[in-house]
Image: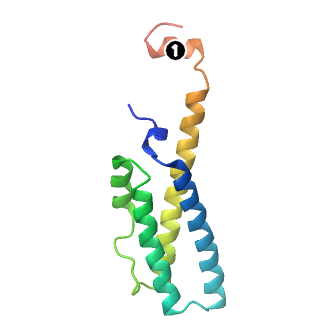
């Protein structure tokens, strides 16, 4: 059985991508509050989103890649509205953060020894 830690092939890369997406989301929120996002910037954000999807795809196992492909916004490109780009980036960022939290929890669980009474219960032995 695979652990969550086995499903993330390059955790450091996933962390960097997560940080990048969060920074871009912050910038996107600030820009839209100032109403200064032009078509070129929106197209650039859409391109970054596409590149991030490719990079994340190379950082996770096939089962996680399948999950990601079913959850992500199908088309984000230069013609997408600012709100569409923002929602897609927030969705991707949230998925990556959830993945990192699950990976961290899985690693912690692997490092903490199972108490003897729980090991006995796993094998159907009475406590």
Out of 74 and 54, give the one closest to the viewer.
54
Q: Is residue 52 above or below residue 78?
A: above
Q: Quadrant of residue 80?
A: bottom left
Locate residue 79, reporting x and y percent: 39, 87
Out of 125 and 76, give the one closest to the viewer.
76
Residue under the image location 65 percent in, 86 percent down: 33
Locate residue 108, reporting x and y percent: 60, 34
Q: Is residue 72 above or below residue 58?
A: below
Quadrant for the C terminus, please: top right
Residue under the image location 38 percent in, 61 percent down: 71
* Disc 1 target residue: 119
Q: Quadrant of residue 54?
A: bottom left
Residue under the image location 44 percent in, 77 percent down: 47
Q: Quadrant of residue 75?
A: bottom left
Residue 15 falls left or right of residue 66: right
Residue under the image location 44 percent in, 53 percent down: 59
Q: Give the class, few, some or many, for how many residues have Cα within 10 Å of label 1's Cα (few <14, many ≥20).
A: few
Residue 97 falls left or right of residue 3: right
Locate residue 81, reporting x and y percent: 45, 85
């Amino acid at each position: 059985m695979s652990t969550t830690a086995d499903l993330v092939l390059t955790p450091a890369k996933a962390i960097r991508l997560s940080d990048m997406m969060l920074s871009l989301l912050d910038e996107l929120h600030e820009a839209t509050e100032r109403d200064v996002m032009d078509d070129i910037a929106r197209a650039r954000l859409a391109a970054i989103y596409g590149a991030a999807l490719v990079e994340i795809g190379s950082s996770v196992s096939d089962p996680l890649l399948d999950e990601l492909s079913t959850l992500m916004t199908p088309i984000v490109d230069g013609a997408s509205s600012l709100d569409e780009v923002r929602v897609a980036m927030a969705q991707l960022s949230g998925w990556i953060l959830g993945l990192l939290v699950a990976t961290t929890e899985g690693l912690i669980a692997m490092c903490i020894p199972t108490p003897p009474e729980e090991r006995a219960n796993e094998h159907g032995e009475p406590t």
